Every structure is written in structure tokens, then in C-alpha cells.
Image: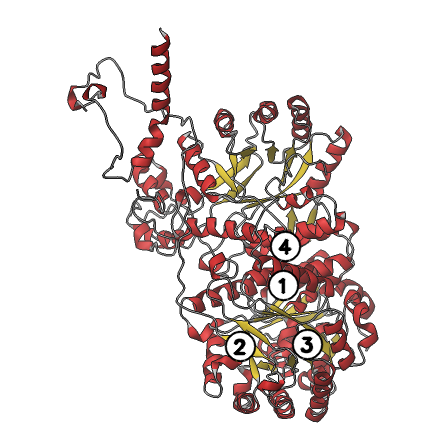
């Protein structure tokens, strides 16, 4: 074989090798336009399909052997534009002097136009925020939670201040637990005083937690709403029980008249959530409603909370306006799981760490399901959540991590 | 030119779009009852609900029905293919997903959690770690949660050393294996040692794919495809490997835990969304998450890395990872993953509650304790599991709170003195015992006074957590009269 023939042979081999790719590329093409292309008729070899005239006598049945590609078959990926007709309402919590309150900062939640962190081009307008808990009376807390706040547990205002100053809370939740008729049955006036003290102590927006009794809560909320005129407190919460107790209307009306926001609480049931919202729409604008669909601890039903939030958010983005409200999660509930606080065999690690990772995991899981506002307790869980919210929302991408070689690293 | 995605051809029906009629039409239609259903339509209904598989219809397995069997298999194929790793005797199954979100149907094949060893460990270290992996377990509401496999990494880059490590592990454990190296010679040395174990080969990339494909075919072993943060490359690799005849693929778009975290979450989400919503066959493969990546970062303290590994793992479980490779063996890192995986893969269509009534444990007598709890499934199963593991003979009244836990039901005024009185009467609790003492959950302590007044039963406030029932009963039962 002379040199030239050899070269031709090589060329031919190359052409044959890329043939499958060319075929693949041409698969869905009906017409090819060639530019700057000339050829002489002598270069053409015509292969015409000969149909029946192919001689099959010599071979048995033809078994197709897949032709192994010699090179990577190119492909590309264009992210399909997922269009969601719906949009989550934006709700502002807290009011500054210029808007009728006394807060230094307000917080706006909601505004999502796609499922959380599903699409870089459809980022949420507002990042999720974190509220830290305060109780108006000493409560039983797991040791690892108690040790951070032991010195302020007798003083809700101090506790609130510590949450903001030391732990960086965006908001503070005051749980008016002592108002529970089955606990201390303290008066609405006293509750209003506690809230007033906290409004003095911190300049962030507040969440006002009741005791769960539909009558007592209404009495407390009415008093607090009036005292804190214009502060855009989040009243936690309005429930379907209030319908039976005939207290939903007064609570919702008070929220409207005194400029507050209502948290509509239902227990893992979307039809109930929609019904409660419909009832609330009769008394106040939808922009004053946030939903709590119930947060259950990891190991005790977190999957129900996860799926109810995924369902609600997806339905809302698909156009169900009755569910298009920002959502809140009480990640503190994670501490109800025994794995979070119980002394266990050494292979499961110290409960101090288990508790922290439990609250963190609870919050992160629901972050992915679209939560806009977290109610939390442990500073370490708060730190992690904050860091990840920042990271997931940032425009920094993966540079420098590409060669993260876990395969051969010595650990 | 038109892009090749979404893939050509008629759009495959999602599992929720398939009606029992679609299945019924392809069944033999003889109503023979060999499947133990009353007729073919009943069988078809249970098929589309995911409660039975087509192999449960014996006539379908006959040769004359081979064609319809195949048609049904295509009709009912999941959007994400199924890949098995390991020997027939001990294997793990990944993928097989029908839907993007679990509430749309249910997730199948809980993501295996695989823990690493590496080939520069001494033999003693290696075997000790293998033992730890095999022995780690946690008893969660009566179920044993465990780790699923061992990933052997080549830190040495030396085929002989890797081969020896693979041999050592394989000789001492029948757990499914993942062999990890980007050097084909190393992987080949490893897999030649265990030709019948069908390990996952990790991984084919843009450089080594040709030899990896040959290895995968020669040993009939599934192959992981690594295209870090590069979805076009991932598609290109998958397309090429399919062309080579390798069909058992597992996709690794890279797990980045710091600045790359949003990319990671985004890539996993995009791949799975494309597969499930747009029937994209090049993305219709199981996804591999590698929280172990945090350990390649180095320099920070071990506890911080473990924390980060745990957090990454649980996010990836929620975001479609069909398998995880991890390094930490610490219980506090692994428990959230094993429990969350278990939860995520339960059937969301199953009710949150159990039936109310009186449940009998052990062989209680007429003087045995009577406890009460609510009918929230997880509350009930937790209490049940604790009573059983402590071997307590007792009666447990399960009050119907509409599937709400004790704490919430007390707060929501569902579990009240009146509702307890109603349960006692409705379930005729008095007929079981000759005393009138009821043990209330500790979390319902605040309603004990009212309950005693309303029911006329003496109320004891039990422990807040049912794990403490045994010591509690030792101290308080029988009650002083």
C-alpha cells in the first residue's frame, strides 16, 4: 500500500467511525443545506438500496450487532421553560413608623413563582426567614435547648432580646402559654402587657402564639390586636375550631381593623386549609393571611408535612388561589421526637448532637417543600438553615469544586 | 436541526393516567381467579394502584401471552428504570420511580445508603469497618433500619492493591458492593476478583467511558455515569453508553456541598423532572448522591464535615437521590437519613390513622393495666412497638382523634375528658377488667383532673414517652387502693 492509499484508508476509517453519529444527528432532519460545498461527480459512490435482490442465501438470519460508537455521541440540554400560572401572595409582617407601626424592620414573605429551588431563572423574590420562640412562662425544654436560654426564661422580654441580639432572629414568636385555661388561665390584659413589653424590647416583627383554646385565644387576640394597633403582628392562629366557637369573625375582623395578619392553622388536610381561607376571605384581604399546614417531627410523620406542603405549593402554582399563601413551619416540633432528646446507646451519638441535627433536618426538608417562615429554637439549627438558605439563593455556582475527588481521597 | 429532546415518539402515559381499562384490555380476560382476585378487572385495578405486579397473573406468563405481557410491561414501566446491584442472594434495587412527587403515587425502592472503605486500609481496619457497616441498625417503630452496601474506593491507584481490598471485603461480606475508581485498569482488577457479584462500577466519565462500557458488559455489572454539573455531557454519555449496549446506568451529576449546592439541588431536580414529567429517556435512570464528597474538602474539623454530610444527605433524599454513598458511621449522622428514607418511602395514600378500639398486648388478666392513646398512626405504632419490646401485658385504648397525635389532640381539644369518656363507653372498656384505673399519656397530664371527674375512672398520669412505660408500671402498678 503506498503512502497516499494509506492516508485515504485512514480517512475512510475515520468517516466510517463517525458514521453512526452522523446518522444520529440526521435522525430528525428532513433537509440538509450545504454551504461552501463543491464536489466532482467522480467523487460520488452511489449506494442504492436493492431491496429483494440482496442475496441472502449465504447467511442465516441477520443478527444486528450494535455498532459501538468510537467517540462520544454529542447531545445537549436546554432546560424546558416550566410555566406556572400561579404565584404565591406576598405578605408583609411588622410595620415601621411610616407604615403605622414601631418596628425598625419589616419582613415580607411569599412571592414564589416556581417550586422552591427548582429553577435558577425563577428564584423566589423573598428568602425564607426565621423566627425564634419565647414562652411567657417557664416551660419544660430538653436540656440542650434550655442551656442557651436558662438565664432569661423568667423574662420574656429579655428572652426576645437575646433571640434577636445574640441569635440573629428575623422575628420573635411569643407563645402566650400561660393564658391556657388548663394551665394558668392568665388574663388577656396580662397577655397584652407581655406583648407590649416585647414590642419595647425588640424592633423586629412579632408572632403572637395563643394556647389553642378557640374562645380564650380570641379574647387574647382581640386585646393584643387593639393594644398593638398597626404593628402587623402575625396572630397564631385562626382555626376551624373558631368557627364552631363563633370566634373566627371577631378575630379576623380585629386583624383587619387593627392592621394585623392571621395565621390560618389546619391539621395536614388541604380541604380544611382551603375552607378556613375561604371563611377568612369574608373578613379580611388575602394579603393578610399566612398558612400553617402543620409540622410534624422527623420520625413522627414529617413525611405527611412534607407532602402536604409539596401538594399545596404545586396546586397554588398551578392556579389554586385558595392555597396561594405563604406558609410557616414550626420546626421546633422536631424536639417532640424521642431521637432528639432521649439518652440512647452510644452508637447513636450524644443526644446534644442528635437534637440539633433533628431540628435542622426537619427545617431543611420543609425548606425544599417551600416554607417561607420557620419557627425555630436551637441557635445551631438556625445557623445551618440560614447558611443553606443563603447558599441556595446565591448566584455563586460550583467553581473549584469540580475536582472534588472523594473517590481517591484519604479520609 | 431539531433537538433530540424530548425524545421522539408518542408520550408515555404517566402511572396516574393509566386506567384499569388500559390494563384490562391486555389481560387474558378469562376471570380464572388464579391471581386470587375475583376477576380480571379487579386485578387490573390493583395493578394500576401499584398493589400487584403483572407477574402475579399466572396465565400472562405463558408463552402464548408473551406479546401482551411485553406490552403490559411497557405500559406499566416506571419513568426511572430499575437497577440492581449485587448477587441474586443479596442485592439492592434502586430507581423504579413512577412520579416526581411522592403524593402523586408512591415512591418505590428506598434509596440504599452505602458506606465507603478504601484500599489503603490495613486488613484489620478494613474488616473492622465492614463489620461496623453490617452491624449498624436502629429499631424504629418495630422496624429494623440498616445500611445497605459497601463502596470500595481506590486510594492507592494500584490495581493489585485494589484487587486485594476487593477480595478481602468480598470474602468477609456478602453485602452489595460499589467499586470506585476512574482508572479502568484498577476497576478491572477489582471486578475480576468478584465476577458474579454484579457490583456497581463507579464511574464512567468523558475520558474512560469506552473501557468502562466494555467492563460493564463483560461482567454484567451496572455502571455509574459521572458528569459533574454538566447535563449536556451527562446526556451525551448516557446516549453513547446505551449505544454501546450498556442499559443499567446510574447517574451522578456530582454532589457539591458548598458553593455548588444550588447546582446540585438543581441538577437532581432537573434530571428527575425531565424523566417523570417529560418522559426524557436519557434521564430516566436512578440518581446517585455522594454526600461523602464533603470529605474531599479537607481542612475543617471532622464534626463539621459530619454535620455537613448529614445535612447534604437528607436534602438529597428529599430531592430524588435513589442511592447515597456516605462516609460517616456516626449514629447521629445516619439516624436522620435512615428514618427520613423510611418515612419518604411509605405509601402516602395510606391513612394517617389506625382504627380506634381496644388493643390487647401479651396475655393480660382482669387486673392488668389499661392505657389510652390516640389513633394517629405514628403515635400508635410507637406505643405498640414500646409495649411489645418491653413485653407488657395490657389493654390499650386507641381513641379516635381523627389521626391527630396526643399533644396536638389535647391542644386542639379533640382528646378531652368527654372524648375519653365516650371512647371508654363506646369500646366497652370496663368489660375487659375488674378495676377502674386508666393510665393517661403524660402529654395529656393537664386534662387528668377533668377526665377523672367526667369518666368516674381513677386517672394515673403515665410517662410522656412510651419508652418509659416499663419502669413506670413497675413503680405504679398495681395502684395503691
Q: Earlier in the sequence, mark 1 or mark 3?
A: 3
Residue placed at 48% from the left, 74% from the top?
A: A89
Disc 1 versus disc 2: nearer the observer: 2
Tell me how many marks there are: 4
Q: CA distance from mark 1 to mark 2?
A: 21 Å
User: Which quadrant of the view contains residue A304?
Assistant: bottom right
Quadrant (top left, top right, bottom left, bottom right) of the C terminus of chain B? bottom right
Residue placed at 77% from the left, 67% from the top?
A: A145
SS under mark 3: strand
* Residue on which disc 2 sits: A91
Q: Earlier in the sequence, mark 3 or mark 2?
A: 2
Disc 4 versus disc 1: nearer the observer: 1
**Could you tell me if the residues under marks 4 and 2 are in contact, i.e. CB atoms within 8 Å?**
no
Q: Does residue A369 lie above or below B319 as drawn?
A: below
> Residue A172: which numbered mark, if any?
3
Output the chain of dot 2.
A
Amino acid at each position: 500500500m503506498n503512502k497516499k492509499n494509506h492516508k485515504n484508508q485512514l480517512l475512510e476509517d475515520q468517516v466510517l467511525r463517525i458514521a453512526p453519529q452522523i446518522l444520529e444527528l440526521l435522525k430528525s432532519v428532513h433537509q440538509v443545506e450545504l454551504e461552501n460545498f463543491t464536489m466532482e461527480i467522480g467523487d460520488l459512490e452511489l449506494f442504492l438500496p436493492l431491496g429483494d435482490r440482496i442475496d441472502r442465501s449465504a447467511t442465516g438470519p441477520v443478527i444486528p450487532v450494535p455498532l459501538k460508537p468510537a467517540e462520544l455521541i454529542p447531545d445537549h440540554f436546554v432546560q424546558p421553560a416550566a410555566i406556572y400560572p400561579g404565584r404565591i401572595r406576598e405578605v408583609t409582617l411588622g410595620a415601621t413608623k411610616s407604615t403605622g407601626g414601631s418596628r425598625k424592620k419589616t419582613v415580607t414573605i411569599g412571592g414564589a413563582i416556581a417550586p422552591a429551588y427548582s429553577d435558577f431563572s425563577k428564584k423566589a423574590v423573598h428568602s425564607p426567614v426565621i423566627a425564634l420562640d419565647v414562652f411567657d412562662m417557664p416551660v419544660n425544654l430538653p436540656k440542650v435547648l434550655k442551656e442557651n436560654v436558662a438565664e432569661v426564661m423568667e423574662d420574656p422580654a429579655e428572652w426576645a432580646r437575646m433571640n434577636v441580639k445574640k441569635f440573629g432572629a428575623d422575628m420573635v414568636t411569643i407563645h402566650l402559654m400561660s393564658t391556657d385555661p388548663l394551665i394558668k388561665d392568665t388574663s388577656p390584659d396580662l397577655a397584652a402587657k407581655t406583648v407590649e413589653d416585647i414590642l419595647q424590647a425588640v424592633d423586629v416583627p412579632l408572632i403572637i402564639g395563643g394556647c389553642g383554646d378557640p374562645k380564650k385565644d380570641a379574647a387574647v387576640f382581640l386585646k393584643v390586636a387593639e393594644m398593638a394597633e398597626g404593628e402587623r403582628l402575625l396572630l397564631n392562629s385562626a382555626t376551624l375550631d373558631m368557627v364552631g366557637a363563633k370566634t373566627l369573625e371577631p378575630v379576623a375582623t380585629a386583624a383587619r381593623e387593627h392592621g394585623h395578619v392571621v395565621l390560618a392553622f389546619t391539621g395536614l388536610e388541604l380541604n380544611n386549609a382551603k375552607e378556613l381561607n375561604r371563611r377568612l376571605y369574608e373578613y379580611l384581604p388575602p394579603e393578610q393571611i399566612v398558612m400553617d399546614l402543620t409540622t410534624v417531627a422527623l420520625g413522627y410523620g414529617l413525611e405527611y408535612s412534607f407532602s402536604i406542603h409539596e401538594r399545596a405549593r404545586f396546586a397554588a402554582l398551578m392556579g389554586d388561589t385558595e392555597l396561594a399563601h405563604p406558609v410557616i413551619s414550626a420546626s421546633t416540633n422536631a424536639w417532640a421526637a424521642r431521637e432528639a432528646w432521649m439518652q440512647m446507646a452510644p452508637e447513636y451519638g450524644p443526644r446534644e448532637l442528635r437534637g440539633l441535627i433533628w431540628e435542622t433536618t426537619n427545617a431543611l426538608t420543609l425548606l425544599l417543600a417551600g416554607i417561607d417562615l420557620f419557627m425555630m429554637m436551637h441557635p445551631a439549627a438556625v445557623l445551618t438553615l440560614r447558611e443553606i438558605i443563603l447558599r441556595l439563593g446565591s448566584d455563586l455556582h460550583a467553581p473549584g469544586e469540580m475536582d472534588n475527588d472523594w473517590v481517591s481521597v484519604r479520609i | 436541526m431539531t433537538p433530540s429532546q424530548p425524545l421522539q415518539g408518542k408520550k408515555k402515559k404517566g402511572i396516574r393516567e393509566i386506567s384499569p381499562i388500559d390494563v384490562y384490555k391486555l389481560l387474558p380476560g378469562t376471570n380464572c381467579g388464579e391471581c386470587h382476585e375475583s376477576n380480571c378487572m379487579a386485578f387490573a385495578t390493583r395493578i394500576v394502584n401499584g398493589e400487584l405486579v403483572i407477574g402475579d397473573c399466572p396465565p400472562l406468563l405463558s408463552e402464548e401471552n408473551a406479546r401482551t405481557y411485553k406490552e403490559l410491561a411497557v405500559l406499566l414501566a416506571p419513568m426511572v428504570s430499575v437497577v440492581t446491584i449485587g448477587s441474586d442472594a443479596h442485592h439492592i434495587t434502586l430507581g423504579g420511580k413512577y412520579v416526581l412527587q411522592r403524593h402523586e403515587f408512591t415512591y418505590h425502592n428506598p434509596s440504599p445508603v452505602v458506606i465507603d472503605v478504601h484500599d489503603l486500609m490495613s486488613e484489620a481496619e478494613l474488616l473492622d469497618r465492614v463489620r461496623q457497616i453490617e452491624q449498624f441498625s436502629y429499631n424504629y417503630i418495630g422496624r429494623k433500619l440498616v445500611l445497605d452496601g459497601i463502596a470500595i474506593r481506590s486510594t492507592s491507584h494500584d490495581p493489585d492493591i485494589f484487587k486485594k481490598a476487593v477480595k478481602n471485603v468480598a470474602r468477609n461480606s456478602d453485602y452489595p458492593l460499589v467499586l470506585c475508581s476512574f482508572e479502568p485498569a484498577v476497576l478491572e482488577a477489582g471486578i475480576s476478583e468478584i465476577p458474579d457479584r454484579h457490583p456497581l462500577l463507579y464511574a464512567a466519565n468523558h475520558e474512560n467511558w469506552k473501557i468502562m462500557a466494555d467492563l460493564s458488559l463483560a461482567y454484567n455489572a451496572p455502571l455509574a455515569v459521572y458528569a459533574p454539573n454538566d447535563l449536556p455531557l451527562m446526556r451525551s454519555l448516557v446516549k453513547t453508553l446505551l449505544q454501546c449496549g450498556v442499559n443499567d446506568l446510574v447517574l451522578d451529576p456530582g454532589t457539591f456541598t458548598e458553593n455548588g449546592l444550588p447546582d446540585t439541588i438543581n441538577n437532581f431536580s432537573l434530571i428527575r423532572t425531565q424523566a417523570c414529567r417529560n418522559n426524557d429517556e436519557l434521564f430516566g435512570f436512578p440518581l446517585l448522591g455522594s454526600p461523602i464528597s464533603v470529605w474531599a474538602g479537607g481542612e475543617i474539623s471532622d464534626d463539621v464535615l459530619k454535620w455537613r454530610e448529614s445535612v447534604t444527605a437528607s436534602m438529597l433524599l428529599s430531592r430524588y437521590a435513589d442511592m447515597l454513598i456516605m462516609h460517616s458511621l456516626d449514629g447521629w449522622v445516619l439516624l436522620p437519613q435512615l428514618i427520613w428514607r423510611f418515612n419518604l418511602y411509605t405509601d402516602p395514600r395510606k391513612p394517617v390513622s389506625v382504627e380506634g378500639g381496644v388493643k390487647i398486648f401479651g396475655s393480660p388478666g382482669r387486673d392488668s393495666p389499661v392505657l389510652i392513646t390516640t389513633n394517629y398512626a405514628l403515635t400508635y405504632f410507637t406505643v405498640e412497638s414500646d409495649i411489645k419490646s418491653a413485653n407488657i401485658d395490657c389493654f390499650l385504648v386507641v381513641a379516635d382523634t381523627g389521626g391527630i397525635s396526643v399533644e396536638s389532640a389535647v391542644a386542639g381539644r379533640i382528646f378531652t375528658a368527654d372524648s375519653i369518656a365516650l371512647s371508654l363507653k363506646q369500646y366497652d372498656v370496663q368489660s375487659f377488667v375488674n378495676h377502674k384505673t386508666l393510665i393517661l399519656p403524660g402529654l395529656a397530664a393537664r386534662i387528668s383532673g377533668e377526665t377523672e371527674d367526667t369518666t368516674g375512672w381513677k386517672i394515673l398520669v403515665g410517662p410522656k414517652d412510651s419508652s418509659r412505660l416499663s419502669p413506670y408500671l413497675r413503680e405504679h402498678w398495681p395502684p395503691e387502693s
